[in-house]
Amino acid sequence: MKRLYIACILSAFATHGFASNTIVDDELQNILEPSKKSIHFFKTQVSNNRSVSDALRALLTRYPDKTKEFVSIALAAYPEDYQEIITASVSTNPTFVDEIIMLANEHNVAKPTAIVEIAVNAEPSYAGVATNAACNYSPEYFNEIVKTAVLAQPDSADQIAQKLVNAFPNKTMEILVTTIKEVPFVGKYVLDALLATVEGDDAQSEEMIIVSVEQLAQYPDAIDRLVQLAHERNIDSDLLKESAVKGGLEEQDVLALIQKHYSQ
């Protein structure tokens, strides 16, 4: 019986343009406006599977190439269950996280920050991709999206920041500051990841280290690593001291760290 319903849904897709070779805009419009027949069939699937997520996972597992269509139908049929729908679809087919975030935004089921939080929690290994997609679709929420994503998955903060810097190089310092302010305890790892993106640019590397010193001045492990890094890159110790003091570290503590690393 379930196979019959699935066949009917796929037939409805073809009838209503989901499997056509029309231009991209027309395809997107068809996906965003599923037919009443498609919604009815999906609701029947939900009744048979006893939950929206079970019905959606079953369809996405069997027909991964129809992920966008099924997710859009689910969001149109059960917009109040957006959290369940996003979680089920991202965890089942994470390679479609970009499209899933786009569809959730287009269906206007929640704020972009809520959507990205659900997505990164559903599949942390795709946190960078999800955050990048959310920032692309809702650039006006850029900083809020970054904050939300790194707070939701701090262990993926370096991956998130690196992905964003590669996509938005003109926002490198903004991404760095926003990220390490929210999750300072992983700030040194975030910095290491971002320094790798500007390899060979000594001026930008120096700026990133100096800014990080100010932001992480009161985190002993991080500031110790930063002073060591500054010495390795021949950054003037006076600049380092000024930035650390500005960040709230006592001058004598800064001098002790400089003495420790710069005397080697």
Image (cartoon, rainbow, N blue to C red):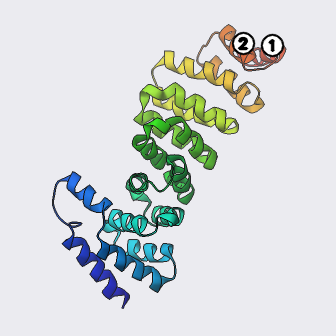
Q: Depth check: give the residue in front, 98 or 255.
A: 98
Which residue does the numbered mark 2 point to in the structure image? 241
Q: What residue appears at the point 65 percent right and 17 percent down from the top-left corner?
A: 231
105 in relation to 30, above or below: above
Question: Could you say which disc has been placed on residue 161 in the image?
Answer: none
Q: Quadrant of the N terminus?
A: bottom left
Residue pushed farthest bottom? 1
Rendered view: 221 above or below 36: above
Q: Secondary structure at mark 1?
A: helix
Residue at 56% x, 17% y: name it. Answer: 206
For the residues bearing labels 1 and 2, Cβ distance under 8 angstroms: yes
Callout 1: few (<14), some (14-19), or many (20+) C-alpha neighbours within 10 Å? some
x and y, in percent, of residue 178 in the image: 59, 32
Please tell me in which quadrant of the rendered image residue 260 appears.
top right
The quarter of the picture where residue 135 lies is top left
- Note whether 150 is above or below 199 in the view shown: below
Residue in view at x 25 percent, y 75 percent: 12
Q: Secondary structure at mark 2?
A: helix
How many marks on residues?
2
Residue located beneath label 1 in the image: 251
Q: Amino acid at mark 1?
A: Glu
Marked residue nearer the N-terminal end (1 or 2): 2
